[in-house]
Image: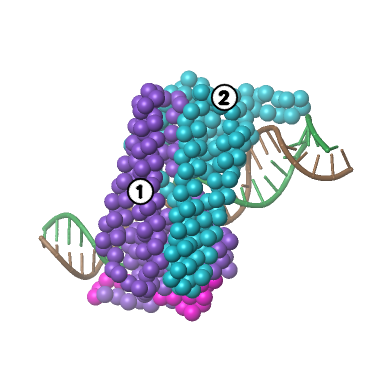
Chain colours: A cyan, B purple, C brown, D green
Amino acid sequence: MELNPTAYVVLGMLRLGRHTGYEIKQLVDNSTRFFWAASYGQIYPELKRLEEAGLVEGKADPQGGRQRRAYELTPEGERALEEWLSKSDDVATEMRDSALLKLFFADAVPPKERAALAAAARERHNAIVAALENVHRNMPADPEKQMPLQVLRFGLDFHSWCADRFARMEQELQEEK
Amino acid sequence: MELNPTAYVVLGMLRLGRHTGYEIKQLVDNSTRFFWAASYGQIYPELKRLEEAGLVEGKADPQGGRQRRAYELTPEGERALEEWLSKSDDVATEMRDSALLKLFFADAVPPKERAALAAAARERHNAIVAALENVHRNMPADPEKQMPLQVLRFGLDFHSWCADRFARMEQELQEEK
DNA sequence: ACTTCCATGTAAGTAGTTACATGATTGC
DNA sequence: GCAATCATGTAACTACTTACATGGAAGT
């Protein structure tokens, strides 16, 4: 059975504990969204598909009069996740960066505007660094969650580097005007 | 009129000269694809839309018996491109990286496999560096194309940095097994 | 009372990929 | 003669976003 990466996001989050679709969305927004986002429009249908496939199991779990459906991994779901994690041959990186796209074509505008584009990109990455630092602060230390921390550190270094590199580009573009 | 970034890829490539849809695809594959890819399935319909909107103009330009349609920017197309380039408030970065996704959930697999994931990511970025160096070698020096060179240098630094950072993560993961 | 949060879901639309069909030209 | 390249295009599909509808609970 072929699952897409978003399905594994759901499986992965459920491996960390029993959760509702709503909670999965919160978890994604506080962690993987920086390299793999997911919306309700993906998560809820995906949960349904995964349940039909027998990889997760949902149970009604109302809180008071509020409807709620909590899911957990089945043994098959756990197996599917581990199998996917063990394949290191299909790792792919895709980027869609409109800042780099604009800079690429920016010979068409005056040098001042080129520098402004680089500055905007720098600011964006700085904002992400701030957001990640916030995530870091609110992250409970859990020996079972070493890898999320590793990836978070990667993300911090990554966006810091990008901010610096765009700052350098900005400088170079300012000098040549 | 609202255009998507892919439309601006087409406009931007046409600003560099008169081209066919086929040629635009080649240009994209040798340059922007690392931060903004585009397939024939996007390019040809986009050219049609842009022509209807009066931003590009296509003329039949057969080579022998082989049909061919070459496009160039209209003054309105040039204006639309410059206007887009002058807005630095809508620059967005989106990443979809299945390597980071796997690493994020990799507490579920033994340390050895975690290190293998980091190694695979490192290799991927090294391959991109090699590809970009190749692009660099085949790039003609043209004072009108300073920004493509700036962006190419950014890309080289970027993927080199990623390769190094994944190498470091790999080491850390090997030590803790 | 009002707002915010918890919670589930879907419909419509946009974006993008893949695979295919077609056919001429060039180089070996 | 054959493979690769030039060239145009579309149909089917997958992925993803946005906006909406619905309603209970908690906080202020």
The spot of residue B15 in percent (x, y) is 42, 73
Q: Quadrant of residue B30?
A: bottom left
Q: What residue is at 37 percent from the left and 70 percent from the top?
A: B145
Which of labels 2 and 1 is toward the front?
1
Which quadrant would the N terminus of chain A be assigned to in this image?
top left
Q: Nearer the viewer, residue B40 or B95?
A: B95
The spot of residue A2 in percent (x, y) is 42, 35
Q: What residue is at 60 percent from the left and 35 percent from the top?
A: A137
Q: Is residue A19 visible?
A: yes
Magenta highlight on residue B70: yes
Decide: is A66 above or below B15: above
The spot of residue B3 in percent (x, y) is 53, 64
The spot of residue B138 in percent (x, y) is 26, 63
Start-end of magenta stretch: B64-85
* Residue ID for mark 2: A17
Q: Chain of mark 1?
A: B
Magenta highlight on residue B46: no
Is A177 left or right of B121, judged from the image as shown?
Answer: right
Q: Residues within 10 Å of mark 1 (few under 14, many from 20)?
A: some
- The local secondary structure at tag 2 comes to loop
Q: What residue is at 48 percent from the left and 20 percent from the top?
A: A75
Q: CA distance from mark 2 to mark 1?
A: 37 Å
Decide: is A137 above or below B134: above
* Residue ID for mark 1: B160
Q: Residue furthest top?
A: A75
